[in-house]
Amino acid sequence: MGQCDRDLQIISFERTEVLPQRGVGQDRRRMSAPARRKKRLKQKRRLKKAGILCITAALLFTVSYWTNWFSEIPGLENKTVRLKRQVESLVKKAVDGQADYPAELVELMEQNEETVDFVKNYAERDRYIGKEINLSDSVEAGSVPLLMQWDKRWGYDLYGDAMIGLAGCGPTCMTMAYLYYTGDLTMNPRKMAEYAQERGYHTEEGTSWSFWTDGAADIGLYGEQISLSENNMKAVLDCGGLLVCSMSPGDFTTKGHFILLRGYDEHGFFVHDPNRKENSKKQWEYDTLSTQIKNLWAIYDN
């Protein structure tokens, strides 16, 4: 075969590869007009459906925002919303005379939604008052326990002329410190409140400041008043001590309150607030605490 024949073969081979591709392209172009019309119709229908869905979603969001409709769906209502709804329901019952709650309990519930269960069970308080208290599930060796003054196990018992749940922040803080240092589970906020009252550490204003020094000594602990400074507070905690703070109105109280400080790190101080668990879940900077602290004491194991 000559050179020209080989060249023709190559040219012919290349063209047979190219021509079918052009043919396919030509067929596609010939079919494109009706196909494009169908495609445009489909796109219009899709856009119409999408528009309807968007408008519907916007209407549902608006309705749910103003009526809390989604909160009625089980599992979608968060804890905060549920507590608020329970508070509103119980307050309404109290106002309408359907429930017999003391005014101070209604006020407590309005200020602190965590106390809803405590207030709701007030009618059944006889199940708890004076009954045996088991703290084995609340105390862990080596950790400062977090106890609530409004715990049903002791919250309905009296401290002076008020319930521990309303006025027992002092005895509850001392109980937390005592349990941490001694591990003695026979002590609880009810017994501590009885002890404070019998020894004269309860006054008309609440718990006497001498409870943190003289009262601590009487139960085998050591307490001393310290001056307010960040370095002093950290030094006590570094030495294994705890801090009790008398708080003025602010983030923790509207009248007066005691809280316990158990430690610190670079983000702030760890607080055990006997009235509000939420305050005990976060850390507090010194600048925030110091403006609200009226007095403070270091508590050590004697």
Image: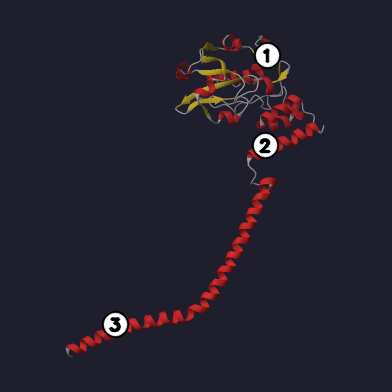
Q: Which residue is mark 1?
A: 205
- Say which element carries label 2: helix
* Dot 2 or dot 3, earlier in sequence: 3
The residue that label 2 is drawn on is: 83
**Residue 166: x %, y % from top left:** 69, 22
The kind of residue tagged 3 is: Glu
Q: In the picture, residue 248 is in which quadrant?
A: top right
Which residue is rendered at x = 67% and y = 39% of the image?
82
Residue 124: mark: none
Which dot, 2 or 3, sits closer to the camera? 3
- In this view, the residue farthest toward the right is 97
Q: Looking at the image, can residue 18 be seen?
A: yes
Residue 175 in the image: state x and y as whole percent.
60, 19
Foreground residue among 166 and 69: 69
Q: CA distance from mark 2 to mark 3?
A: 80 Å
For the N terminus, the quadrant is: bottom left
Tag 3: Cα neighbours inside 10 Å, few (<14), some, or many (≥20)? few
What is the quadrant of residue 53 in the picture?
bottom right
Tag 3 secondary structure: helix
Image coordinates of residue 293 in percent, x first then y, are 56, 18
Amino acid type, mark 1: Glu
- Report, in whole angstroms, how far the alpha carbon at label 1 lies from the one at label 2: 31 Å
Residue lying furthest left in this view?
2
Q: What is the spatial separation of the Cα atoms under label 3 and label 1, in whole angstroms?
A: 105 Å
Label placed on residue 14:
3
